[in-house]
Image (cartoon, rainbow, N blue to C red):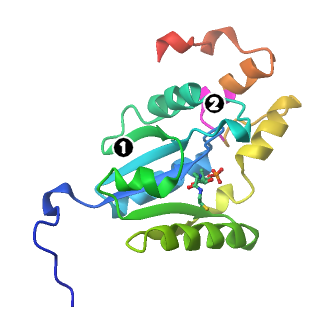
Amino acid sequence: MLQKKKGEDKDMGKIAIYPGSFDPMTYGHIDIVERALEIFDKVIIAIADNAEKRPLFSTQERLQIIKNIFKDTPHIIVDSFKGLLVDYVAKTNAKVIIRGLRATSDFEYEFHMASMNRSLNPHLDTLFMMTNKDYFFVSSRTIKEVAKLGGGVEGLVPDLVARRLKEKFKLPVSKKKQMSWDDM
Ligand code: PNS
């Protein structure tokens, strides 16, 4: 029966968590966030703080970059979490995890992760959104690889991310666009 339980947070609106490494954030991720905002009242972008993955950008750097990207977008919260995603979600009022799917090759990993999360918390659902066709081939891993080898990633990641990648890989950054971490 479609009945709300007494005391259920009607006023909170629908909140979704969009977790990931975002190392770095691409236009594929941004497209998912923008579409999620059409469905949910609030989206929490949750950056996994997992040093074992040896990210190129520290958690602090990723937080700064993503906060900057969405600085003019209301209803977005950018946060980081350590440990189990379900434990982080439990501290919010979200009931839905959003994940983007690019290709069938993503499916197996995502299916296992969603199933494990649901086994840990049966009240949680994972909503898969198909990546925009323009970004099917874009992943943080390939973006880093191309950028490291001096290839252009403009149009696939925000300008800020393209600049940060150049700085990380010690490639020349155009002076005009240069921005320090303190500007953010
Ligand atoms: O962008 P990614 O690296 O594909 O994101 C994966 C992420 C961070 C969502 C996933 O690894 C995760 O939820 N990590 C937190 C630890 C956890 O809860 N693991 C159990 C899920 S199987």
Q: Is mark 1 within 8 Å of ligand 1?
A: no
Asked if residue 173 is positioned above or below residue 104 in the image, the reply reads above
**The residue positioned farthest toward the bottom in the image shown:** 1
Q: Residues within 10 Å of mark 2 (few under 14, many from 20)?
A: many
Q: Is residue 131 visible?
A: no
Q: Residue at x 72, y 51 (%)?
A: 138
- Which is more toward the observer, 154 or 126? 126
Q: Give coordinates of residue 173: x percent, y percent.
A: 73, 15
Question: Which one is in front, 101 or 156?
Answer: 101
Say if disc 2 is inside 8 Å of ligand 1.
no
Q: Picture coordinates of residue 146 (x, y %)?
A: 83, 38
Location of residue 92 with respect to 155 vertically, above or below? below
Please tell me whether mark 2 sits on a helix, a strand or a loop. helix
Q: Give the main secondary structure, helix, strand or loop, of the magenta stretch.
A: helix
- Residue at 50 percent across and 26 percent down: it is 64
Q: CA distance from mark 2 to mark 1?
A: 19 Å
Residue at image mark 1: 76
Task: Give the labeled residue for mark 2.
Answer: 161
Query: Which stretch did the figure color magenta?
Result: 157-162
Q: Position of residue 73 (x, y in %)?
A: 36, 39
The image quadrant where one finds the N terminus is bottom left
